[in-house]
Amino acid sequence: MIDAPSSTWFTTNPHWQWYIVLYFFIGGLAGGCYFLAALIDHLGRVEDRPLARLGYYVAFPAVLLSGLLLTLDLSRPLRFWHMLIERNTFEPMFKAWSPMSIGSWALLAFGLFSFISFMGALAEEDRLRWPAFRRLQWPAFRTTRPPAVTGLIVAVLGGLAGLFVAGYTGVLLAVTNRPIWSDTPLLGMLFIVSAASTSTALLMLLAQRYGWRALPGVAALQRMDGLVLALELLVLAAVVVSLGSALRGWLNAWGALLLFGVIIPGLIVPLVLSWRQRRFTEASIATMAALVLIGGFLLRVVVIFSSETI
Amino acid sequence: MRESDCVVVMGSNMAENHPVAFRWPMAAKVEHGAKLIHVDPRFTRTSAVADIYAPVRAGSDIAFLGGLVNYVINSERWNRDPFFRSWVVNYTNAATLISDQYQDAEDRDGVFSGLMEYKAGVPEWPYNGFTQQYENASWQYAGTRVGDQGRTAATAQSGETPGTKSGMGTPGAPQPSGPPYDALVRSLLKPPAARDETLQNPRCVFQVVKRHFSRYTPEMVERASGCPRDTFLKVAETILANSGADRTTSFAYAVAWTQHTNGVQIIGCCALLQLLLGNFGRPGAGIMALRGHASIQGSTDVPTLYHSIHGYMAHPTALKKHDTLEDYLAAETVPTGYWGNMPKFVVSYLKSMYGDTATVENGFGYDWHPKIFGDHSHLPMFVAMNEGKVRGMFCIGQNPATSLNAKLERAAMRKLEWLVVKDNWVHETANFWKTAPEIQSGEVSPADIKTEVFFFPAAQVAETEGTFTNTQRMMQTHYKAAEAPGDCRTDVWFTYQLGKRLKKLYADSQAPRDQGFRNLTFDFEHEDPKERQIGEPSAVKLLKEMNGYQTADPSRHLAGFGELKDDGSTTCASWIYSGVFPAPDRNLAASKQPDPPGQPGAHLNWGFAWPANRRLLYNRASADPSGKPWSERKKWVWWDGSKWTGYDVPDFAGTKAPSAQPKPGGIGLDALSGTDAFIMKGDGVGWLYVPTGLVDGPLPTQYEPAESPIRNPLYKQQSSPVFKYWKQDGNPLASVADPNFPYVITTYRLTEHYLSGAMSRWLPALTELMPELFIEISPELAQEKGIANLDRVRISTPRGQIRAKALVTRRIRPLQIDGRTLHQVGMPWHWGYEGVVKGEIVNELTALVGDPNVTIHEGKAFVCNVEKG
Amino acid sequence: MAEPMGFYTDTTVCIGCKACEVACKEWNQLPATAGGANTMSGDSYDNTRRLDGIHWRHVKFIEQFPESRQDGRWLLMSDVCKHCVQAACLEVCPTGAIIRTEFDTVVIQSNTCNGCRDCIAACPFGVIDMNPVSGTAQKCTLCYDRLQNGLEPACSKACPTDSIQFGTISELRARAQKRVDQLHQTGENRAYLYGADEKMLGGLNSFYLLVDRPEVYGLPPEPKMPSRNLVPGSVYTVLGAIMVGLAGLFSFRDRTSSLGTGPGPEVRP
Ligand SMILES: Nc1nc2c(c(=O)[nH]1)N[C@H]1C(S)=C(S)[C@@H](COP(=O)(O)OP(=O)(O)OC[C@H]3O[C@@H](n4cnc5c(=O)[nH]c(N)nc54)[C@H](O)[C@@H]3O)O[C@H]1N2
Ligand SMILES: Nc1nc2c(c(=O)[nH]1)N[C@H]1C(S)=C(S)[C@@H](COP(=O)(O)OP(=O)(O)OC[C@H]3O[C@@H](n4cnc5c(=O)[nH]c(N)nc54)[C@H](O)[C@@H]3O)O[C@H]1N2
Ligand code: SF4
Ligand code: SF4
Ligand code: SF4
Ligand code: SF4
Ligand code: SF4
Ligand SMILES: [Mo]
């Protein structure tokens, strides 16, 4: 204690563990995939539309799962609603300066958008078989897809909400007094970039499973992943620098895991792969995507547990 | 203590064991920068807030205190400052000459004149624990005889063999009888001892004391106690600098001074020092005997002690000439000083015992009163029990299965026919037949234990109405906060009901020995019908009995012991408490008005402090011989020209002028002069030198504990020549410097636990704070023994072996004794085999040895070995 | 609001008796570690180790003894929630369970807390933790219930040496400064006040007199508000978002064209 590198070393760990790690990862994917889907909806070719729908198909279940994980992590899960409504006054509970408070609202909003888009996608593919849907929603839902204006708006707002959900978690960690987390302001940036890289990787992986290699969007995703990975590497470097003396928290097993579980296999190797061959082989895409996903997951493991164990 | 300029805590860990009382030393520190000194083998939580911490070897206190005495007597300041001279000459026996028969330990290498084989005692009770005793005639003041100066000890003293009379008077000569007993008392008068006010006479107390302590030099202190010379000198200088006309130093001790085979002498040595420094009867001065249990003070005042009756009067004994009331009074009354009134106390006490049946004719029922015939204190009783001499025991509020020489005491209890345990918990003693170590190990099988155990659930203190008397002799009423659950009853209920039933049992017995029970007045029926119905006696009536009343009209309470008569017209159980309940509607123990803050005062309206609500005893000494305060800063009680007045109730004859001379032929206070501040003493002065009352010497002398790793550095005599030891299997002693037991071990308490743990080890909020038994050892010893922090270690003594976790800490330090390194270890002793947390029993290690005066065991210093595993 | 109330803790008169710790437990009916069957820590006399959901007071024991034992010290200190004027825990709490009372103290409403544990991570002093029984985050309430009934907090009431002093902040600060001066005069120059002035989180309503560096007592030398990272953190995150956005634009740039219409080719996941 006496030679603590930073005042953050005198605090108690909040016991945020696997639920939170998973939430950060899956929440990131949800936000990221929706964002990509929205991107494709706007910039993509008509052939890419399945890719976009894929994004929405991933986003909604993922955000549901996220909410579930968050609730399960509460010591009093049945009080999850206290996050949104003040328990004694029953007025809305919103603290603009508390990331967790905004985050809860953001998750709610994003949940809504991703639900709409999810249904929209289903509608577009004419998958809403049940008579109920047929009669009412489905014409409505159709309008939630581009080129309908409502569709555009939903996609834009949803995309932004998605990005928020993907990124606020890093800010939430920073807005504490825990070692590492609050010793750098860059975690939000790191998470958002990593969310992008993992999401692109996931979509690529799925796209490939369905044998859509022909789709122009896939190639674009590949290019994007390359860029984002490079970006992520830079941001991570910046994080390390910004930690300063608090870096002590990573001069241990966690640091090793970061290097040999995240940086090398999860960032550098995929980067090299993506630069080496412009034209991807089946296998290399799979490995690259898989590595990125694993790396992205481990990144969150390291960030959370390296502080939790102090 | 709040008034002290220097507080010396020695022989106690006051902060940890008396935290609430400790607020006053801390207040003195914060309010006027008083110095706090702690002398202790371990660096404790008291040391943590002390200005000076002096490490010592357990068992070396007299060397240290003797060193202080020697330092003071030879210091430039003490010999220059007129205050000390005047105080010592007028208020102590420094000037008194001692019999030329007397030979000091100085001349006989550690023993005093008069040592002889133990003769006292009766064959029926071979458990007094003595092998030798002192014939103390040679210790007396020049020209006086044993008993002239005061009461003699109960179980060992020349002239105390049955039949012969202690004190004066020849057998056969007709005893002047009373009441009134004035004639008898007057017949005991002796010419006062010779004095030399110049203190030059080599036989005067001062010179004897000076010689006696001459070898207690700072170098010797360091050799014997291991306390670095400069630390010792710093302590000495601080104490001296904070004593005098306008500064006072107080001492606080507890059982680290008593639990030794020379414990009384340690305390005596401190008294001697404080008398030399004029630190008695003055604000911020004195010696605080920090009592243990709540109201343990009360239980010695209205005694659970075997050897005295209420108010510190000797218990009638078969070992002295106590055959009749007159004999008893003749043997026990000191004609001069306030004790000259003892006949009034005794008769009033007997009236309270036997009421109307106590008459002049039957000596107020004196014959019915039980007599003791030896040492019936805890240790001898258990030895007797172990030899099958005791058939049954009431264990009320004790846990002997763990608290003293545990293994032996459990063995003793196995020999009982019946055992009544009345406690809040089914503790180690209640289950000694079921879960004790020897049972668990299969060594003893419950089937072979014939003892029938009865358990009575006890009410807690908060479920009881009554009073506490604290260390300061202050009695305070406490009220019932809650009803006791179920069958739980108060202890006074138990005693009362038992007494009533026994009276019934003896109601029509004609046997002489049963007359005591038959005539005992025992009527304390509760006012409240609800309480009466469950048989709870009335605390108010009990208090009234203690306070005393006019026999003719019990509704007229006594205003104080001044009203006591020796003709039976007054009834009073405990003279010292007389005045606490002066009128049926005035219970001073219940008064709770503090003095307004800021102004000097004694808070006389807060509770009642015996005697006569005096807060400082002998406070006449707070004024100089002429009656003026010694200084403005330390004024307390003074002579205003016509009477004694001040902040406190003067502890002196109210209107006796400072210049007053003793009345020729006067008894009681009349025999004392206007400067004789120590009114309870026959000669009216404080005793530097103790001619009578102690069985192990008139002056404190450094003796080694019964077990010590070193030879006595001061004398050839290793330990007290008269300490008590009982030869029992399971009670061997290690020989001096026994290589198998090279370390000094001491045992003590933790704030977090209470004694045997029965009051703390059942309470999770406390047990989580100190869950496990441990032994504190220095890193140095730990390294020597390859012991790491929290390792399990084995601690062994000639008596037994236990395991505990190691707490390795630099708060414990190796000492340099006589040029070689000596290791000390320490263990708290709060654990046992019942409760929320359990642990082994430290008292499996202690020896069955005792102080010769008071028979307390030596739990504070013995030897052991420590091994890993 | 009534005058701000709080604690001044003079560690130089603490005797480590733990009466405060126990009084707090008793008054607030808190459970004990392992039902009392705790294990010894081996770290001096401290077996409860730290403040948490069931230890709202905690007494620290710091042994400072050189091998020579020269001027060894045993620092004793009773730690508790600082009731920060700028309270990190209150700031982040998403449910509003943490409130500031009329006594300017900080209290967690157990009926509102849902156990997200954000406050635990936020408190600069590591004061808060979960109470396994209530399943909510808990800490010292500065005896809100007692204060509301005009009673002194249980811990300070129990403290025999007045190491813990309760009162109005203004009065306590004056008293504390006097004590520091006294100690300086008597040669204890190391004495200073921790958290008595606004510089530290706007002032700690439970501040301390210490005689060594804060770290020695397990206190942060410079406690900060979590919100210090809010703006920079958000800015960088947005920056990240923009970069990701750009990366997207760049990657899809050559596919920019009229938005596809209709369901598109029937490729199905
Ligand atoms: N919390 C708590 N308070 C208690 C009690 C309790 O069990 N728990 N018990 C009560 C009772 S019954 C009593 S009698 C008192 C006892 O009160 P204390 O006498 O203060 O209690 P101890 O802890 O037995 O001993 C005090 C100190 O004596 C030191 N010591 C040991 N040997 C020697 C020696 O030879 N010389 C000197 N100078 N010091 C030595 C020990 O290191 C220890 O620190 O406490 C009472 N108060
Ligand atoms: N080695 C070693 N041994 C020692 C000591 C030491 O320092 N070292 N200290 C010695 C000293 S000073 C003492 S005082 C003794 C104490 O030794 P004990 O007196 O034998 O031990 P306690 O735990 O005080 O036992 C008190 C019992 O009274 C019960 N009790 C509490 N309140 C009530 C009540 O109102 N009514 C009844 N009926 N029971 C009640 C408690 O539950 C407990 O069982 O130990 C001595 N033993
Ligand atoms: S236990 Fe009772 S007697 Fe002992 S210190 Fe506490 S209050 Fe005083
Ligand atoms: S100390 Fe921690 S818990 Fe207490 S008020 Fe400050 S931030 Fe909140
Ligand atoms: S754990 Fe409870 S008190 Fe703490 S931040 Fe979450 S809701 Fe608020
Ligand atoms: S103020 Fe009350 S709640 Fe806070 S520590 Fe003290 S006793 Fe416990
Ligand atoms: S009660 Fe007071 S003295 Fe005891 S530990 Fe607590 S703060 Fe220190
Ligand atoms: Mo005791």
Image (cartoon, helix red, strand yellow):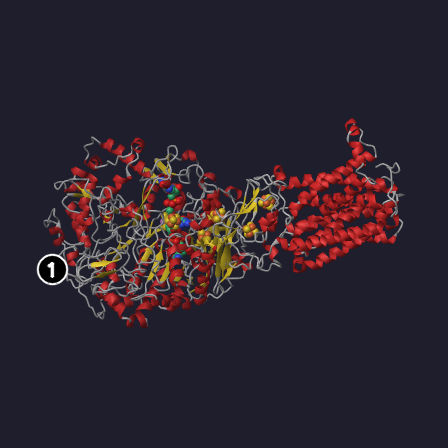
Query: What is the quadrant of the N terminus of chain B in the image?
Result: bottom left
B103 to B869, vertically: above or below:
below
Given the image, on which type of amino acid does mark 1 rest? Pro
Q: Position of residue C164 (x, y in %)?
A: 45, 54
**In the displayed structure, does residue B812 sit left or right of residue B211?**
right
Residue B320 is left or right of residue A157, and the answer is left
Q: Position of residue B702 (x, y in %)?
A: 34, 61
Give the image location of residue C71, x and y in percent: 47, 64
For the residue with label 1, is its CB less than 8 Å from the closest atom of ligand 1?
Answer: no
Q: Quick check: can you spot residue B49?
A: yes
Secondary structure of the residue carrying numbered label 1: loop
Residue C38 point in image, percent of width and height? 52, 45
Q: At 40% from the left edge and 35% from the top edge, which residue is drawn?
A: B449
* Count of numbered circles on the image: 1
Check disc 1 and report the residue beneath it. B664
Residue under the point 79% across and 26% down: A131
The answer to whether residue B847 shows anywhere in this view is: no
Q: Is residue B515 rendered to the left or right of residue C134?
A: left
For the residue pair C215 and B216, the one nearer the viewer reads as C215
Of all residues, the one furthest to the front in this rendering is A149
The chain containing the residue under callout 1 comes to: B
Instruction: Count residues near mark 1 (Cα–Cα under 10 Å), then give few for <14, some for 14-19, many for 20+.
Output: few
**Viewer-proximal residue, B469 or B325?**
B469
- The reply, left or right, for residue B710 in relation to residue C195 is left
